[in-house]
Amino acid sequence: MKRSVENHMNILIFTWKDLGIPDVCEALDKLGCSWNCVSSEHLRERVSAEFDQLFERTFEEGHYDAVFTFNFSPVLSNNCNRRNVPYLAFVYDSPLIQLYSVSLINPCNHIFLFDKILYQEFVQAQIPTVHYAPLAVNTERIARQLENLDCVEETEGGKTVRESYTCDVSFLGSMYNETPDFFGRLKNLPSYVQGYLDAAMAAQRQVCGHWFIEELLTPDIIEAMQNSLAPARVRPNPDGVETVSWIFANVFLARKMAAVERKELLTAASEQFETWIYTPGPTPELPRVKNRGPVDYYQYMPFVFACSRINLNTTLRSIRSAVPLRAMDIMGAGGFLLSNYQSEFYDLFVPGEDMEIFYSTEDMVQKCDYYLKHDAKRRQIAANGYGKVKEKHTFEVRMKEILSEVFN
């Protein structure tokens, strides 16, 4: 199907509590497209008669040139396949187990992955339905919000928004310290298995850019992990090709490594700098860090990123090479980003000019110290990063690229 995205298109959007839907709709408006957004809790299910009926009713009421979602929905893909309508999925989560559904190869699919290594793996497996697309930000929406930085917040004792959110170092995100966490569900592991997993995670944490821990999960180690979960053993989905080792590596161990890394980084930062965290749960393991609780993605998050002198990013290890959403959002709000190494930062940005990378906890502390003492340089880097996101990584840019790749 060949057509110009400048021609009028009507896009059906399905969602269930996704971030970014208003930004996609605003981008489609700018591109001259019409859209209809439908919310359904059944979107995340593999098979759903209720969703099938909703899909049919929606298509009986109007004509659509394509269907769009964030992430990937097998039940939606199967419905689009029956209707022979293009399905555009823009993935921003990792790990996303739905990508291993057999519905991934439905010819209606156009699945845009934000992680280049994952994209390359699917291509090497001869999956023809995947594309590569970095994540995006609505810089115009954020700029409108940041016009209120010097307004007084009644809830903050007469402080301005800027004063309420200004600190030396901040981190916004999960600490993966919920009880019980996935790794914590592995009860009564044999001591040699616990030691093996601890050593494997420690080795993986020393290596950037290569995810090898799944290869270390030998059959006897997997069986011991399964036995520790009994009777609730890990099982692949009936329509999935994911393996038990993939689930253990990307869900159980990746989250545990993130919890350890984030605690280590924030502990080190808080020993020298004013450090705040924005996270849903309590953090008694971080006594020097001020926990501000969670903030709304749309209403307050841009204030955090714009006002923090240094915004830390540490990426979940299941994100193999990509620039994660948090990093894009920080730069899209004009914030200074100090991130762990991800290879795609070198593809999309210039570290040291648009953002900065740390390679160890000690390096993170040293760079925090340097940039807090060199305010002009820090502000220039933040401005450069914002300029590049505004030029190349807005939703308007990305949605035009996606539509062009599918329809041109």
Image (cartoon, rainbow, N blue to C red):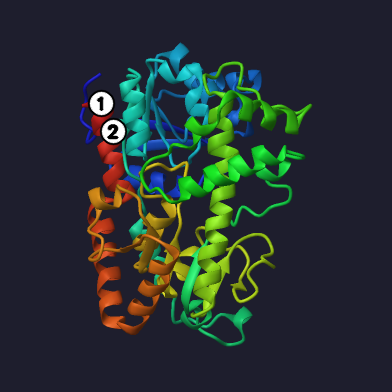
- Using the image, determine if residue 329 lies above or below residue 222: below
Residue 30 at least partly seen: no
User: Left of 393 or right of it: where is 235?
Assistant: right
Q: Which residue, given by chain and number where applicable, does mark 1 sit on?
A: 407
User: Left of 394 or right of it: where is 222?
Assistant: right
User: Left of 385 or right of it: where is 182?
Assistant: right
Which of these two is toward me, 151 or 316? 316
Q: Position of residue 339 (x, y in %)?
A: 39, 60
Looking at numbered disc 1 in the image, what kind of residue is underneath it?
Phe
Which of these two is toward me, 35 or 321? 321
Farthest residue, direction top? 82
Displayed quadrant of residue 122: top left
Q: Secondary structure at mark 1?
A: helix
Q: Residue at x 63, y 79 (%)?
A: 155
Q: Secondary structure at mark 2?
A: helix
Q: Quadrant of the C terminus?
A: top left
Q: Residue at x 38, y 79 (%)?
A: 369
Looking at numbered disc 2 in the image, what kind of residue is underneath it?
Leu
- Using the image, determine if residue 407 lies above or below residue 281: above
Q: Which residue, given by chain and number where applicable, does mark 2 sit on?
A: 403
Q: Which mark is residue 396?
A: none
Asked if the residue at tag 1 contacts the one at tag 2, i.e. Cβ–Cβ closer than 8 Å, the answer is yes
User: Left of 407 or right of it: where is 333?
Assistant: right
Q: Quadrant of the N terminus?
A: top left
Binning the other alpha carbons within 10 Å of mark 1 as few (below 14), some (14 to 19) or many (20 upward) gives some
Which of these two is toward me, 261 or 100? 261
